[in-house]
């Protein structure tokens, strides 16, 4: 008998048929004697709809109210799944975050889980009830509803698994595991049977939607066995592992991308100490998160300064820098919010030179211009025009021979 936390994403609970299929899947685990805690997302498209609704009422919607609004989708699915389970003779009981309670800080829209009360969950499990918990939401110390950021139901599930000391946390989704690249973009992307926490954390942080970055962090910190698998069909999925034998690792394990990017350039800035702090100071205090930063070598006492922010923060950041430009007497302030970031990730990169060259050659062969580059020990990220994103991902995937090996024709 195992204790398993299963999380079902939007597509997996996207219709009445899918809700029944989830209940059937949970019932199979119960039938073999496992205990299951279910975490669900809103029906697919629902959270987007609620976000749009909020924006259509208010140009600058209050973060607290947006959380109350967007968390509503999960309230619907927990009740539906609990009903479908109960109809099958397995009493299910729905829980909102504050009923559990899942405690977070007060950062609306990106709250972090601080503690989970396991009392009611454990009592249910002991009496044969299946708790069905709303993903994505939490409650702060003042009783305000909070949300964990888009895709945050994964984090709810892993945090509950950690708090309960579960044997495994299964992220059940519309793909049958973690692939070498988004299978929606790369036809011959290959499912990995396992991937290290370190790599998965990079992939998720760099844009791979398949897991919420915080969920991977939690799994690593609390040593929760984490598996990504299909909710539609049986299969082993992908196990996120602690161990890594770097000598046996491929150089590059996977490719991630993000369209959620924009860049801002302040050109012709006096090349004197303190410029970066004058430009990025107000941005940081906003607070707007800055990702890549490039400062060109100065000429004639002037320099160009470029950095990237999330696309949602682009207009606000550009507006704020208008005043800084005047203050610094910079020649030009410009930006581009139609850029994308592509990253290659692999712990094997540590012991191999020449990864960057191979990447740049592949992009050059397709005539794709690289606008910015940043590297770390186990990843290289590049910024390209958004229109080249898919081509870039595919050609890099080919260059590192990550694709599935074709079965020999008879
Ligand atoms: P859910 O609603 O179940 O949480 P998501 O849409 O958040 O599902 O995540 C699953 C999606 O992640 C897949 O449909 C796939 O398009 C995308 N994805 C991006 N990168 C990868 C990858 N490397 N491996 C698998 N899926 C990926
Ligand atoms: N429903 C939320 C979202 O769409 C959380 C999730 O799906 O994980 O972002
Ligand atoms: Mg998701």
Image (cartoon, helix red, strand yellow):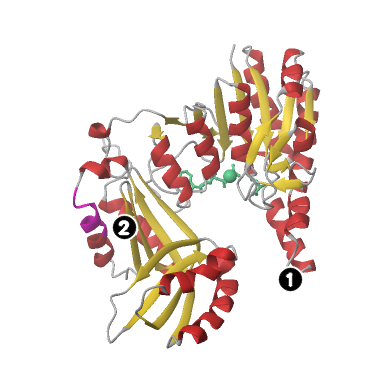
Instruction: Depth check: give the residue in front, 192 or 302.
Output: 302
Q: Quadrant of the N terminus?
A: top right
Asked if residue 64 lies left or right of residue 337, the reply is right
Instruction: Depth check: give the residue in front, 135 or 65.
Output: 65
Residue situated furthest left in the rendering: 353
Label 1, ligand 2: CB separation under 8 Å? no
Q: Quadrant of the C terminus?
A: top left
Residue 356 within the magenta-colored segment of the rendering: yes
Q: Which residues are magenta?
A: 353-359
Task: Give the structural element (helix, strand or loop) at label 1.
Answer: loop
Q: Is residue 135 visible?
A: yes
Circle 2 residue: 395
Do labels 2 and 1 touch, CB within 8 Å? no
Residue 312 position within the rendered picture, expressed as x and y whole percent measured from the top left: 59, 66
Q: Residue at x 79, y 21 (%)?
A: 91
From this view, report whether residue 117 is shown above or below residue 388: above
Residue 211 position within the rendered picture, expressed as x and y whole percent measured from the top left: 52, 42
Residue 373 position within the rendered picture, expressed as x and y whole percent measured from the top left: 33, 63
Q: Is residue 96 visible?
A: no
Residue 244 within the magenta-colored segment of the rendering: no
Q: Residues within 10 Å of mark 2 (few under 14, many from 20)?
A: some
- In the rendered structure, which disc, 2 or 1, sits on the residue that comes first in sequence? 1
Circle 1 residue: 59
Task: Name the main secondary structure of what is drawn in magenta.
Answer: helix
Asked if residue 155 lies left or right of residue 337, the reply is right
Asked if residue 230 lies left or right of residue 307, the reply is right
Q: CA distance from mark 2 to mark 1?
A: 40 Å
Asked if residue 24 lies left or right of residue 285, the reply is right
Q: Residue at x 77, y 25 (%)?
A: 92
From this view, report whether residue 123 is shown above or below residue 81: above
Residue 43 position within the rendered picture, expressed as x and y whole percent measured from the top left: 70, 45
- Looking at the rendered image, the disc whose residue lies closer to the viewer, 2 or 1, is 1
């Amino acid at each position: 008998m195992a204790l398993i936390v299963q999380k079902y994403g939007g597509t997996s609970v996207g219709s009445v048929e899918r809700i029944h299929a989830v209940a059937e899947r949970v019932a199979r685990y119960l039938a073999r004697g496992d205990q299951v805690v279910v975490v669900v997302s809103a029906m697919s498209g629902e959270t987007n709809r609620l976000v749009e609704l909020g924006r259509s009422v208010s140009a600058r919607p209050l973060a607290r109210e947006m959380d109350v609004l967007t968390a509503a989708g999960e309230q619907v699915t927990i009740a539906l799944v609990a009903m479908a389970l109960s109809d099958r003779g397995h009493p299910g009981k729905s829980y909102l975050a504050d009923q559990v309670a899942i405690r977070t800080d007060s950062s609306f829209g990106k709250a972090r889980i601080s503690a989970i009360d396991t009392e009611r969950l454990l009592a249910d499990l002991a009496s044969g009830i299946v708790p069905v918990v709303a993903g994505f939401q939490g409650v702060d110390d003042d009783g305000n509803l909070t949300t964990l950021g888009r895709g945050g139901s994964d984090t709810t599930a892993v945090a509950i698994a950690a708090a309960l000391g579960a044997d495994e946390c299964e992220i059940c989704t519309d793909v049958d595991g973690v692939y070498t690249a988004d299978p929606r973009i790369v036809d011959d992307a290959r499912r990995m049977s396992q991937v290290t926490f370190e790599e998965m954390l990079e992939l998720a942080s760099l844009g791979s939607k398949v897991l919420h970055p915080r969920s991977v962090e939690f799994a690593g910190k609390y040593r929760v066995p984490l598996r990504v698998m299909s909710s539609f069909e049986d299969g082993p999925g992908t196990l996120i592992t602690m161990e890594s034998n770097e000598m046996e690792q491929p150089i590059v394990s996977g490719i991630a991308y993000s369209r959620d990017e924009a860049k801002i350039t302040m050109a012709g800035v006096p090349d004197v100490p303190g410029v970066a702090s004058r430009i990025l100071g107000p941005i940081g205090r906003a607070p707007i998160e800055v990702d890549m930063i490039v400062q060109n070598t100065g000429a004639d006492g002037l320099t160009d300064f470029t950095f990237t922010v999330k696309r949602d923060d682009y207009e606000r950041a550009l507006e704020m820098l208008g005043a800084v430009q005047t203050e610094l007497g910079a020649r030009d302030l410009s930006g581009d919010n139609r850029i994308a970031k592509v990253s290659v990730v692999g712990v094997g990169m540590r012991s191999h030179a020449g990864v960057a060259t191979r990447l740049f050659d592949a992009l050059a062969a397709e005539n794709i211009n690289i606008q910015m580059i940043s590297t770390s020990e186990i990843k290289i990220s590049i910024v390209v025009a958004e229109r080249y994103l898919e081509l870039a991902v595919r050609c890099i995937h080919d260059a590192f021979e990550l694709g599935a090996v074709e079965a020999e024709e008879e």
